[in-house]
Image (cartoon, grey):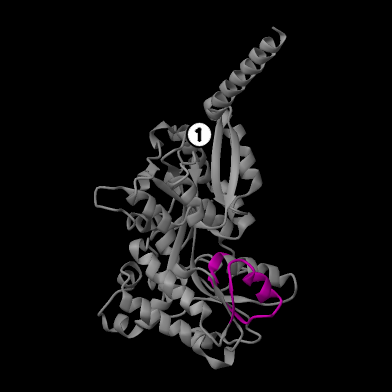
Amino acid sequence: MKKISVFFAIALMALAFASCSNNDRAHQLKVLNWADYINEDVKESFEQWYFEQTGEKVEIIYETFDINETALTKIEIGKEDYDVFCPSEYIIERMLKENLLLPIQKEIIPDSIFYFNNVAPFVVDKFQQMAPNASVNVSDYTAGYMWGTTGFIYNPQHVEAEDLQSWAALLNPKFENRILMKDAFRDVYSVIVLYAYRDQIVSGEVTRDDLVKNITQERVDAVKKVLLGAKKQITGWEVDFGKEEMTKGKAWLNLSWSGDAQFAIEEAAEMDVVLDYIVPEEGSNVWFDGWVIPKYAQNTKAATYFIDYMCRPDNALLNMDEIGYVSVISTPEIVAEMNDEEEWEETVDASYFFGEEPIVIDGEEYDPHALHLNPVFYADKSIIDRCALMHDAGQAQEMILEMWNEVKVAR
């Protein structure tokens, strides 16, 4: 009898624990985000804010990832029940195609705390280009988070900006063994294909959007030829250590993202090293990361509130300051904080992002065509006009990856 009693006691405890765990899931918010990609205070303050708005408690269960595809596999194959996920644009596009996203329940957010409309119309329009068909409104499924461009981080002590007006810099023998290449085959492909077909772009035979979106064997081969020609100049293929190598002066150029460029510039300045960033004239890609609610989410209410909270201007500024990337939020509060005539003497035409109309802040008007902004964060309209959105490669992914691996091992 004693053994039986112990058995039943253990069984009852197990049932109670299981019941408690199931109930707890209703008060948990499982977030999957890039590492070092949020201000900790913003993340931690959400729980209290959510309680104030709903009267319900929620605990954030936070996980990070470093590769888009690995994170997607956890959801697609493993059916992990993350409530909020922050992938890149081409993964969002793939998830839309494969019916792996739930609509964001914007209708449950009170007007007084509805921040989704703070996302720049520029970003909303770019996201709509990811729609699998004309009937899908992409903004029903995602809200942008951070964005930027791809270009060269460079050390002006060794490299002149004039030498970086074209992606042809990768082929310049005076940079032999001095260039770091971002180990991101889609990002690199989508900028080098613009260089490979530069003459056709100028003649109007093809557009940048078409080159980036429609991947063919001919175009992959053209990119491969350029990259093979750059092999002697490439000293390494990096995912994250490029910023450090540039700061130490071990490399003069780094094909990288604008967010990493800003981080590297700030880190280098602390060591009295000057770095800068430039986007070549052939054009580049404009990339985005955004918040989505995956198909197997269990707490869609808290997920919707969380995404809305990330769209609040003060939180956007805190996140930008912490991670060194630029937010998709385009309200006057952002302009008031980021516009700095003393730090940025030259102006940037950011009307594509902040709108055409004058921005009024404390009774003073600011011209969105001539704002004093960090040009790494907010590229001039003339640069953005030469940028294309990176898309899901679909079945052509293997074609690009095979080319990439062949280039990396080639001698």
Q: Is residue 245 a member of the stretch shown in magenta? A: yes
Q: Nearer the viewer, residue 72 or 269?
A: 72
* Outermost residue, top side: 1
Q: Quadrant of residue 214?
A: bottom left
Q: Is residue 200 a member of the stretch shown in magenta? A: no
Picture residue at 41% right of the left edge, 76% below the top: 283
Q: Is residue 141 visible?
A: yes
Q: Where does the image place residue 280, in percent across and percent down from the top left?
A: 46, 79
Picture residue at 30% right of the left edge, 70% below the top: 210
Q: Secondary structure at mark 1?
A: helix
Q: Where does the image place residue 391, in percent across and percent down from the top left?
A: 37, 62
Q: Is residue 349 visible?
A: no
Q: Quadrant of residue 93?
A: bottom left
Q: Where does the image place residue 71, in percent across and percent down from the top left?
A: 51, 51
> Looking at the picture, does residue 324 appear above or below residue 331?
below
> Looking at the picture, does residue 19 appear above or below residue 122?
above
Picture residue at 74% right of the left edge, 75% below the top: 272
Magenta region, residue range? 235-259
Q: Nearer the viewer, residue 240 or 306?
A: 240
Q: Nearer the viewer, residue 291 or 106?
A: 291
Q: Quadrant of the N terminus?
A: top right
Question: Residue under circle 1?
Answer: 302
Q: Amino acid at mark 1?
A: Ala
Is 201 left or right of 409, judged from the image as shown? Answer: left
